[in-house]
């Protein structure tokens, strides 16, 4: 079975359900028109209820089928996109263009011109720690003493 097989089968089933729902709708309308002149209205009302129940069940099934169709279509689109991407990558690799791009080349060039001075960063860190240790902690309860 080809890849289109399950998708086409689900579409044909959905079309069949739509026709069956339309036929049930037509049957219900005809029964409603015949109701006022019917010698057995109870029997006709039971028939209408049965047809409506059948119609609702078919509508639920149609909804499930359409959801399955959407999933199958999305799966097919994803497969097609993946194959196109793989073909594009293959062509790029054949040309030698598939190498990863270096987006930090400007930064590396800057580092080559002015190398990082790690010792200055460490001195600044130590100075900041000394400043923090030197400061007295804030007294959070100073408002309470005034009362």
Image: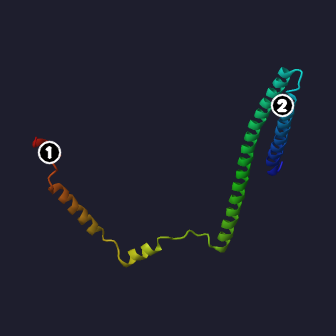
Q: Residue at x 80, y 44 (%)?
A: 10
Quadrant assignment for the C terminus? top left
Q: Is residue 47 above or below residue 144?
A: above
Whole-percent x and y of residue 56? 76, 33
Whole-percent x and y of residue 69? 75, 46
Q: Secondary structure at mark 1?
A: helix
Label 1 neighbourhood size at 10 Å, few (<14), some (14-19), many (20+)? few
Residue occupied by mark 2: 32
Q: Is residue 42 above or below residue 107?
A: above
Label 2 neighbourhood size at 10 Å, few (<14), some (14-19), many (20+)? some
Q: Residue at x 26, y 64 (%)?
A: 122
**Which of these two is toward me, 79 or 31?**
31
Disc number placed over residue 143 in the picture, else none: 1
User: How many angstroms separate mark 1 from mark 2 (CA)?
Assistant: 83 Å
* Label 1 vs 2, first from the N-terminus: 2
Return the residue found at the far left: 146
Q: Quadrant of residue 23?
A: top right
Q: Residue at x 81, y 46 (%)?
A: 11
Q: Secondary structure at mark 2?
A: helix
């Amino acid at each position: 079975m080809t890849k289109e097989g399950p998708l086409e089968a689900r579409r044909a089933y959905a079309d069949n359900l739509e026709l069956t729902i339309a036929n049930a709708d037509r049957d219900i309308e005809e029964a409603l028109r015949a109701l006022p002149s019917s010698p057995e209205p109870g029997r006709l009302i039971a028939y209408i209820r049965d047809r409506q129940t059948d119609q609702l069940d078919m509508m639920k099934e149609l909804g499930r089928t359409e959801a399955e169709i959407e999933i199958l279509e999305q799966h097919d689109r994803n497969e097609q996109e993946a194959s196109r991407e793989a073909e594009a990558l293959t062509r790029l690799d054949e040309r030698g263009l598939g190498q990863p791009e270096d987006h930090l080349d400007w930064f590396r060039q800057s580092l080559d011109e002015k190398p990082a001075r790690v010792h200055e960063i460490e001195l600044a860190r130590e100075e900041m720690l000394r400043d923090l240790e030197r400061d007295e902690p804030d007294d959070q309860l100073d408002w309470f003493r005034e009362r």
